[in-house]
Image (cartoon, rainbow, N blue to C red):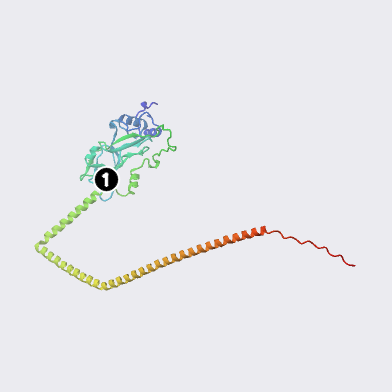
Amino acid sequence: MQTDQITYSSNDDEAAARATTYEQNDPFPSIPRALLSSVEIDDYARVTGMLFPFFPKALKSASYEAHIGGSAIWWDEKGKRIERTVKRGEQLVLEANSIVFVQVEPTFRLPDYMAIRFNLRITHVHRGLLLGTGPLVDPGFHGKLLIPLHNLTSSPYNLNTNDALIWIEFTKTTFGAARTEDQPADLKKFVGFPPNKRNMTPDDYLRKANGGNPIRSSIPDAVGDARRSAKSAERWSKTIAGIGFAGFVALVVALYAVYLQVGSMIQNSTALTASVQQMLLPVAADTKAGSEKIAAGQSQMDRMNQQLDQLSRTMETKLTDRAAAAQAQIDRLTQQTDRLNQDLDVIKKSKPPRRSSPKRARPAAVR
């Protein structure tokens, strides 16, 4: 079927089936990867089911307006959790200086090539509301957005749920883009949206944010403390006014008596401190003298160590010199001995051989 013949999803199941089909398959590959205008938002919402329900009349030139729709959760001044379901057209009052967590109407099933950003309508901002969340939603997100709304005013804020709460912009990312570089990265891995973070409930978000504990604005507590301080000051002022002039004089006299007692205690403490200091002076002097003697002894020991080191180096130098001289003498004697041995060998080789004497004939025996 041609994409121009596909109509809007008629129910949530049909939108979910289309989201599965086009999760990674871009039905409009010719559309540039950039911020989408209203025409492209309409096409992708119609074909991919990336949000349901979808109302074409809520489109702006480059964004889509979404109404409140779903759970609204807050905690009262006693920390009690309050939750109710709010639909478009129903009343929702945000108490002064409070935080209310609300869901928006559409269910999102973003494909892997689509990211969204959202923010509060400027009308609500001008009236004192603040949207406290990060505006980027990653590709692959499935579920409803849970948005914390801060009423920063000192009066309850009646939220008109017939008006849109937020505006949303859609950006087509570079997922699946054909690479034309000569040397692209060898390892290209797309990090998809974690499956375990899809279709999270409001309790899942709040439990992850604060462990299920109450989430309240600190402003009411600060205001309460200020009011209690003001009431305490007012009661004190009334007490002073009620005791009259005579009572006030009596109070001043009593305070003066306390002042005198405190002054006497301070004087006694000062005298005791001075006495202790006088007692410690001789000890300090002895300690100083002992420290000086120790320092003098240490200095003398350092000088002796230096003299010993110098004497050791001198003796070592002399012994080294004498050993070198003795070795030189030994070398000379060795050389002389070698020469004498050589001369002796020459003499032995040059001596003529010894001649043997002729043998005489033995006389014949006389018979």
> Is the residue 126 above or below the residue 57 in the image?
below
Q: Is residue 150 left or right of residue 12?
A: left
Where is residue 150 drawn, in percent x and y? 25, 44
The C terminus sits in image quarter: bottom right
The quadrant holding residue 364 is bottom right
The quadrant holding residue 114 is top left
Choose between 124 and 299: the one closer to the eye: 299
Choose between 314 and 131: the one closer to the eye: 314
Where is residue 316 drawn, in percent x and y? 46, 65
Local packing at callout 1 (Cα closer than 10 Å; few below 14, some 14-19, many 20+) is: many
- Residue at 63%, 60% (x, y): give it: 344
Query: Looking at the image, can residue 159 be seen?
Result: no
Q: Is residue 63 left or right of residue 264?
A: right
The quadrant holding residue 187 is top left
Choose between 201 and 233: the one closer to the eye: 233
- Residue at 22%, 53% (x, y): give it: 225
- Residue at 55%, 61% (x, y): give it: 332
Q: Amino acid at mark 1?
A: Ile
Choose between 350 and 116: the one closer to the eye: 350
Residue lying furthest right in this view? 367
Where is residue 274 drawn, in percent x and y? 22, 71
The N terminus sits in image quarter: top left
- Residue at 26%, 45% (x, y): give it: 99
> Is the residue 288 above or below the residue 95 in the image?
below
Residue lying furthest left in this view? 245
Count of numbered marks: 1
**Residue behind mark 1:** 99
Query: Looking at the image, can residue 168 be seen?
Result: yes
Secondary structure found at label 1 = strand
